[in-house]
Image (cartoon, helix red, strand yellow):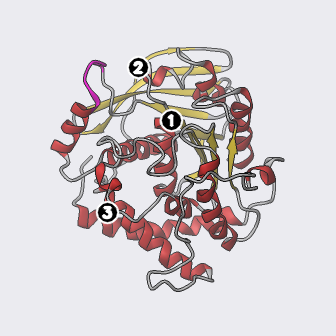
Amino acid sequence: MHFVTRRRFLAASVAAVSCTRGLDAVGARDERGVNWLDEVQRPPANIPADAPQLKPLLVDEANQPIASRDAWMHRREALRAWWLQFLGAYHPNRPPAPRIEVLEEDHPDGVLRQRIRYEVEPGLSVEAYLLRPSPLPRSCPAAVVLHSTTQVTICQPAGVEGEPEKAFGLKLAQRGFVTLCPRCFLWSDDLTIPYQQHVERFQTRHPGSRGMAKMLYDAIVAVDILCSLPEVDPKRLAAVGHSLGAKEVLYLAALDERIGVTVSSEGGIGTKFSNWEASWYLGDEIRRDSFTHEHHELLGLIAPRAFLLLGGDSADGDRSWPFIAAALPVYQLYGGTPRVGLFNHRTGHAVPPEAERRIYEWIEAYA
């Protein structure tokens, strides 16, 4: 596994836009879905005063309206290239998925759960939990499940320890999904190492890249692994995460078009909604007046694939609505029913039972 220069990466990223041929199929799917879609596409009764004013997405670089799908695709390509350049993203000239080493396994109800290890860079390994339904169907949907900020890291989504309502990987496996729950690079076998030290190590290896570039790349490798498994249907891929994981799945869905359905829970979608300025995410440049981009552009890249934003009036909530409102016109360009929305459970930085139920309903409906 090796990495290309930023120039070569950006050339590859432009070529990768050709993957949008798959977006036609997404937009043309049947109208099945959750029975509460209308609810999550209605604006809140009172949008908070601190909700951001976002630039329309359907305006080109010359500030002219975009009225056609073809014109949007040109704008989409430019937005994708800008975000990749901003990340300073390193990108693999990726070989087949890395070899998996199984460290241990057990059999919780209806699931084979394996703790595995694989290389994400030469000499740099990561651990994850891989969960499969048991017995294993011939063709399964699959999901990348990214953990929140917790010392138990991958044990949380795999249901080994931590809050049971965040065991998305285990519960999706019990619903027939193959799931992969990789450890974020901010943790290692030595949990006493500060986040900043991990960032410094990464940036020494890959100067000019932001922390989110590393998170994105590691998540892409997780998708590669899922797609390499013979029991996984690579056309039915999901991503879900809470808090830290919610931030990661936003970028993963925007920049890896294999992800067909996403749930982002309480990540803080706005760059000013939470600690996006941390060095392990985007850095302090996003707090400067000269930074004029926002994450509704990522939602534009995700369209027309299914995206559900969950908030509790903590990191996300009613003030997140402008992001959904800005994305809806882009979704409408693709035809069919837009599959994007915001559900505010109003219980803070948590996953209450109603939100948890909707996570699984959304993923099962659209994967």
Question: Magenta includes 194?
Answer: yes
Label 1: few (<14), some or many (≥20) within 10 Å? many
Q: CA distance from mark 1 to mark 3?
A: 25 Å
The amino acid marked with disc number 2 is Gln
Residue 59 place in picture, x, y as percent:
53, 79
Instruction: Write the residue at 42% across / 47% down.
Output: 220
Front residue of 75 and 140: 75
Q: Assign the magenta stretch its main secondary structure.
A: loop
Q: On the picture, is 323 further left or further right than 85?
A: right
Indicate whether 61 appears above or below 206: below
Pointer 2 residue: 151
**Nearest to N terminus: mark 2 or mark 3:** 3
Give the magenta range: 189-195
Indicate whether 43 appears above or below 202: below
Pointer 3 residue: 85
Marks 1 and 2: CB-CB under 8 Å? no
Label 2: few (<14), some or many (≥20) within 10 Å? few
The amino acid marked with disc number 1 is Ser
The amino acid marked with disc number 3 is Gln
Front residue of 363 and 47: 47
**Nearest to N terminus: mark 1 or mark 3:** 3
Instruction: Write the residue at 40% across / 70% down.
Output: 15
Front residue of 355 and 301: 355
Residue that lies at the very extreme toward the right in this rendered image: 35
Q: CA distance from mark 2 to mark 3?
A: 32 Å
Indicate whether 185 appears above or below 29: above
Residue 6 place in picture, x, y as percent:
24, 62
* Secondary structure category for the residue under label 1: loop
Pointer 1 residue: 243
